Structures are given as structure tokens and as C-alpha cells.
Amino acid sequence: MKKNWVRSLLWALAGLAVIAFFALPLQQYIEQPGSAESLKPFVTVDGKHDQKKGSYMLVTVGIRRATPFSWLLAQTNDFQETVSRQDLMGSADSETYNQIQEYYMTNSINNAITQAYRAADATYHVDYLGMYVMSVLDNSSLQGQVKVGDTITAVDGQHFKNNQGFIDYIGKQKLGQQVKVSYLRGSKAHTSTAKLIKLRGTDRIGLGITLTDRTKVTTKIPVKIDAGDIGGPSAGMMFSLQVYEQLTGNQLRRGRKIAGTGTIAADGTVGAIGGIDKKVVAADRAGATIFFAPNDPVTKAIKKVDPDYLNNYQTAKRAAKKINTKMKIVPVKKFSDVLAYLEAN
């Protein structure tokens, strides 16, 4: 009788161990190829969706909570990567992290509209509203005063036309100097005094906060981009392309499935993003024939710090070779590079 009880206990423990192996959530996440989604449902220009053949596609990286089993499998998969919660979200809680991604997407959409209308020679106007606060460093004297989501509107009474103007102004001040920071929380104005500090890992001084431009774009021909639950700035370049196609009717797509990734800046620069190897896999699975990849500069300084560094384009090319895809990987530095390639090909 005792032996039967012990045997039953051992079987129960073994069952619990198996369940834990396959289902116990770890404090780790797995990044993997996500989806490649047509931009047609997201964009309307002059109240209309794109009805032409083919599609421009944004590409995502899938993120899921790891279990012991999925963590083990990820170690053997070239296109799955395990990351900690800290690596994924930093010190932000889930709500703050999602809020930050929403701000990045809003800024990206405004830049995308600006680039598309500029390239199409269509009428638009940009109002610069300030800079979203995306994070406040622990050693910032603004810690406990400004919060993620506040909008910095001025420093020492100086207003700026973009983030770079703010950086240039701060760079001319002195370490330890006190500056007056004006900001909005919702619609309510606030003012705080902050001490300029040396930014970690650099020779620059600053407030110890990270920022992204907050703009509002007004267009003569109405345009709307609704990204749904998708956050972050990495679809900016592809949104520009979708809007441009609908504005001009140029039919650069010619019925093809065209994917890509990259941020879009106010000057049309296409910026680097994370997880591009996984996005190449997702685009290939969706049947894309062209994939636009940011060709960010690889400087001597970068190579000195990391001799094995590969930029987005190089990483995408390596991923494409690994999966033996026929999809063409096209390097781009500016939005104009994207248009030039499609016009020539």
C-alpha cells in the first residue's frame, strides 16, 4: 500500500514537472519572425483605400513569453532570440512601455505623411508642438517632476523647431548649469528647474531625458493612418510609400508584394530598426519579392567598438542568404532612394 502511494506521488510530481516544462512562464521573452501585413487597411487618402493589385507591407517582430521548452527550442533556431524583460522594456512597466510605443508610432506617422506629401508635391503644413518625454534617467534632476508622456515646449524660454534644435541649445550650455524647463501634462502648463548633467557613455551634457518630436500635420488632401495595435516607429518608411502611391497614382508597385522596414525622419532619412533578420523571414513567408532595408552608416568608430558590427542592410542580406530566398534586398538611406528604385525597376 505504501509503495503504491509513493508511486502515485512520483507520477504526480513527474506530471507537474512536465506541465511546468511546457507551460511555466519564465522572466524571459522570445523574439521571432512576426507577420507581414498589407498597409491597405491602415491608410485612407481622400477618404479612399488602395484598391490596386499587390501590396506594400509592414513587417513585425513577434514577441512571446518564454517557457522552459520554448526557451530551449529558441537556442537552436537562427531566427529566435531570447531577451530579458529589462532588455525588452527597460525599467518601464507594461502600460508605460505601450504608451511609449504609441508616441513613437504617432511621430512616425506624422513624418511619413510629411515625406509622402513632399515627394508628391502636395500641400501640407507641419506644426511643431514640442518633444514627448520618453524616459527620465535615474540621475536626472527632473526625476519625480516630468513624466513619460509630458511635452517639453521650451528651455529657458527658447522654443525649438525640432529635437535637434533642443540638443544644439543644450550643447552650448555648461555642465552643472541650471535651466528652466517648460512642459505640458495634458493641457496644463508646468515649469521646473533642472541641472545639466553629463550623459552616461558620452562627452555631451543634457537633462537626462530622452525625447521624440511631437508634431501635427495638416494636409489639403485628407489622409488618415490608423496603425491599430501596432506600435513603434519602424513602419514609417513603408507608410510613406503607401501614402505616396495613393496620392500620385503612379502605380510603382505594379501588382507586386513589396515589404520593408525603417524609421522615417523629418528630412527623409530612413533609420535603422531592431530584429531585421526576423522581418526578412516574415516578409519571405508572405510572398514579398522586394524588401527595403535601412543602409545605416558603418563608421570607423562603430567598427572600433564592435569589429563584427553589421548594419541593417548587411544583416538582412545575411538572413536572406540563410533562408535561400529569391526576395531582392534593397539598401536605402533616404525615402527618395525607395522611389528611385521602384521607378527604375
Image: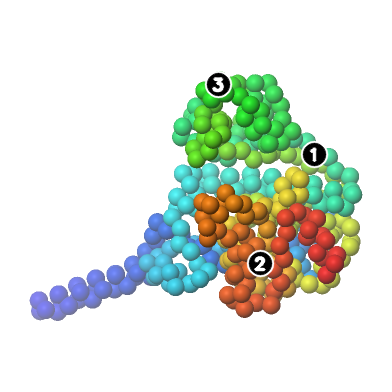
- Which of the 4 image quadrants contains residue 345? bottom right
**Above or below — where is 171 with respect to 177?**
below
Q: Quadrant of the N terminus?
A: bottom left
Whether label 2 touches label 3, CB < 8 Å: no
Which dot marks residue 36? 2
Which dot marks residue 126? 1
Whether label 1 touches label 2, CB < 8 Å: no
Residue 137 drawn at (x, y percent): 49, 36
The residue type indicated by label 2 comes to Ala
The disc, 1 or 2, on the residue closer to the chain's N-terminal end is: 2
Q: Which residue is mark 3?
A: 177
Residue under the point 70% across and 48% down: 108
Residue under the point 53% across and 66% down: 32
Residue 164 drawn at (x, y percent): 68, 36
**SS type, badge 2:** strand
**Above or below — where is 99 with respect to 76?**
above
Q: From the viewer's perspective, is 115 left or right of 152?
A: right
How many angstroms separate mark 1 from mark 2 (CA)? 30 Å
Residue 246 drawn at (x, y percent): 85, 59
The residue type indicated by label 1 comes to Val
**SS type, badge 1:** strand
Closer to the eye: label 3 or 1: 3
Q: From the viewer's perspective, is 32 left or right of 114?
A: left
The residue type indicated by label 3 comes to Gln
**Above or below — where is 290 with respect to 246?**
below
